[in-house]
Image (cartoon, rainbow, N blue to C red):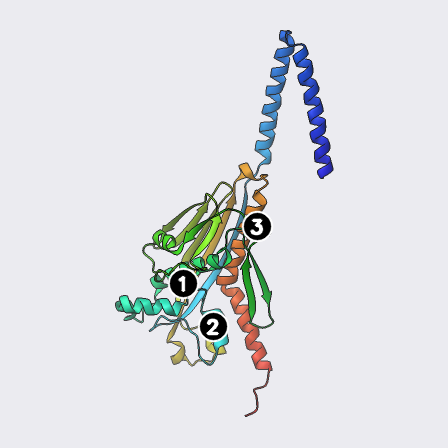
Amino acid sequence: MAAMKITFYVLFAVIAGLAGYLCWQNRASEKVVVTFWSTLTLGAMATFVSLLFSLRSETKEAEFLSIYTIERKTKLPLVPHDQMWVRGYTDRQTHLPIGVMIEELRATKPEIFKNEEDFGTDIYKGFALRNVFDALAFAYRRGWSSKVRRFQIPHHASLKYSGLAEEANPSDYVELARFQELFPKRYLGKPEPAGPFTRFGVPQGTVVSAKDDDFSQELVLENRFSTVRISLSFTFGSRGSGILQELLPLNDKEDDRFAMLGFVVKIHAKLNPLRIGHPDMERHKRWVDGLIAELRETMESERHWKTVSEEFVLRKRIPAPAK
């Protein structure tokens, strides 16, 4: 492919050079000058039209469900002390545990915990946003060209770390304080001193904006190469722990202490069609793919449920140790 490109460039340069030479030698001829400029104009127009129709918009999308299983009274995630393996499904814990944010809220706004019939939907809208921030802060704390490497250890455990890619690119950073400003109605935890997980990198020149209403919260990252939209929409709230009632197990009275909150996470990335063939576009595609992968790994309940159910099956097969 490279050889073909070089051959084409050389051939084009030779032909263009010969045409320019002949035109210069006959520059006193009005006919030659008119022919030259009209041909050049038509060629430029044809090239422009051809490029315009060949540059097509490209999008990358993902949509998944993120479920929080909580205790109705305390609003804390369901994490049985004798069944800690369930935590991988019930608690979207990333950098800042939800329990810490709950206690901070309890100290400043105790009234929101008095009504058990209120499942804490508004609270968890903020917590879900904080999960988005923490996932991106882990993946891109060193810059937007960072790469997350994962190693899956059989049955529930996993290891992952974020390191710089082979080639670092200039980054802007979104600090937690700035993220909180984008969503002033949501509680995202107390401000933290500067540290490795208090910001995430985005391509240089990225404009960060947000939308927050009763139906959804949306984070927008827009730059010359792409526009990425990450939205959270509250979908359902129901009493009980669902299928976890059978796994733990819980009787009906015990199960009624809990509730499930479901959020649909949508990621939509549109790549700029006018730069689709730019040499830097591949880096931006990798950034978008990595962003989607990290959010799915952190927040997608279907993935977490698969891990937890495998753990449950394994525990059932292994006989209990003799006392």
Quadrant in the rendering for residue 76: bottom left
Residue 237 versus residue 206 in the image, above or below: below
Percent coordinates x, y for residue 253 in the rendering: 38, 80
Percent coordinates x, y for residue 251 in the rendering: 42, 81
Tell me what residue is drawn at x 61 percent, y 16 percent.
Answer: 38
Tell me what residue is drawn at x 61 percent, y 25 percent.
Answer: 46
Disc assigned to residue 286: 3
Percent coordinates x, y for residue 43 in the rendering: 62, 23
The three-letter code of the residue at mark 3 reads: Arg
Tag 3 secondary structure: helix
Tell me what residue is drawn at x 43 percent, y 57 percent.
Answer: 133
Tell me what residue is drawn at x 41 percent, y 77 percent.
Answer: 255
**In the image, farthest residue toward the left:** 111
The three-letter code of the residue at mark 2 reads: Arg
**In the image, farthest residue toward the bottom:** 323
Instruction: State how far apart marks 2 and 1 are (Cα).
Output: 21 Å
Left or right of 107 on screen, residue 188: right
| Category of crowding for the residue at label 1, using alpha-carbon neighbours closer than 10 angstroms: few (below 14), some (14–19), many (at least 20) | few
Q: Check disc 1 and report the residue beneath it.
A: 236
Instruction: State how far apart marks 3 and 1 are (Cα).
Output: 33 Å
Q: Nearer the viewer, residue 174 or 277?
A: 174
Give the mark, 2 or 1, whose residue is nearer the N terminus: 2
Left or right of 107 on screen, residue 291: right
Q: Check disc 2 and report the residue beneath it.
A: 87
Tag 1 secondary structure: strand
* Quadrant (top left/top right/bottom left/bottom right) for the N terminus: top right
Give the mark, 3 or 1, whose residue is nearer the N terminus: 1
Quadrant in the rendering for residue 45: top right
Q: Nearer the viewer, mark 2 or mark 1?
A: 2
Give the mark, 3 or 2, whose residue is nearer the N terminus: 2
Percent coordinates x, y for residue 99 in the rendering: 38, 70
The three-letter code of the residue at mark 1 reads: Phe
